[in-house]
Amino acid sequence: MVDKNKISVGYITTPHPHGPMHIKTLDVLDEVDQIYLCGLENEDLESMASLSSKVVSKTTDLSEILSNKNVDALLVCVRPDICPGVLDAALDAGKGALFEKPGALTSKDLKPIAKKAKELGITMGTMFQNRFGPSMQDIKRIVDGGALGDLMTVEARMVTSQVRYRDPEMWIFKKDMAGTGILGWLACHYIDLLCHLIDSKIKTVSAIVANRNPEKIEVEDTAGLVVKFENGVLGTINCGYHLPSSSAGYSSAAYDTFIGIRGADGYVRLEPSEGEGYSLMSISPDWESGGLRQVDFNNMPHSEAYGDVGGRNFVSDFISAAIEKRPAKVTIDDAVHVLEVIDAAIESSNTGRTIDL
């Protein structure tokens, strides 16, 4: 019987921009009592262990941490090319895992893992923690509550610092290690959010991807997608490494982001890069008294977790789900679908055809 106030988490990591951020999340979670650290691919274990006093052991042997009976759940932050193998081994060990997006090079690499997890009844979750932000949670309730009426279109923009600020030699720009570029690294979040917010999967993709930065990298740095969802909604997704004058690295990079959802009775829009908040207009009978309104979140609680309080709550919810053997709020199947969309975007750009999933 697991003591839910004294949970032991195995943290499996390779050199990764988000590696230090995730261990800080585990460090601030009250229910996490111990962290068992496993570093692969020359991860700096000493540096990682220094970020939390909860670390009780360090190893470079994946089998050692997976066979540890004290480990109640796993957090996996590894490169996409090795993530499926790590997740497969975790399933063989009977341990649920929350893994960094995108989770694999392609959807074909992740689908067998999702199928196996379902057959075994083991919880697998994807690190799409943006769903837990206060604006996103409000907008989900607004859309589900009918404030926008019959949905018509959605729009998303994920633009961030240019390649030169992100170390062009890093593995995220290597095709055999990352699979894709801006699509798999950041646009994936907004693909997932659009599907989540309107409760529908994407079924058709037309896209053009390109390289517009002067640095020679192996994956796309720019992409534009036109999509159609299963519920008939049309959407556009614009993404790229385009912004100059940014801090170097990944923890404080510049962003220009936007989400808009429009329906017959209203619309909602938000710019996450400008802070938490959104605008809502509705003429729906249950909402029209408010007219056009601007919602801003002030004096918000703060957490050192990756993704702030929402990110903290996201990981906490997954740990509970893994222990209770219930589905995660963001499942491995959600990651598979996002990868299917990305695969289709690359194929569409390469062939000049619209791709049906």
Image: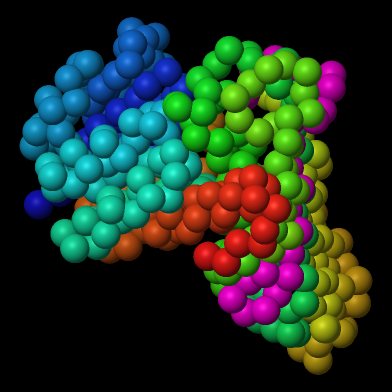
- Nearest to the observer: residue 284 or residue 244: 244
User: How far across and how far down the image is residue 90, in percent?
Assistant: 20, 41
- Nearest to the observer: residue 347 or residue 71: 347
User: How far across and how far down the image is residue 39, in percent?
Assistant: 29, 19
State the image quarter where residue 300 is shown: top right
Residue shown at 38% from the left, 50% from the top: 108
Residue shown at 24% from the left, 48% from the top: 96
State the image quarter where residue 191 is shown: bottom right
Residue shown at 45% from the left, 27% from the top: 176
Q: Is residue 316 visible?
A: no
Magenta stretch in the rendered image: 228-251
User: Would residue 160 appear left or right of 77 to someone viewing this image?
Assistant: right
User: Would residue 248 appear left or right of 6 to someone viewing this image?
Assistant: right
User: How far across and how far down the image is residue 211, in percent?
Assistant: 73, 30
Residue located farthest toward the right when viewing the structure as drawn: 292
Query: From the viewer's perspective, is residue 112 above or below residue 281?
Result: above
Query: From the viewer's perspective, is residue 46 above or below residue 296?
Result: above
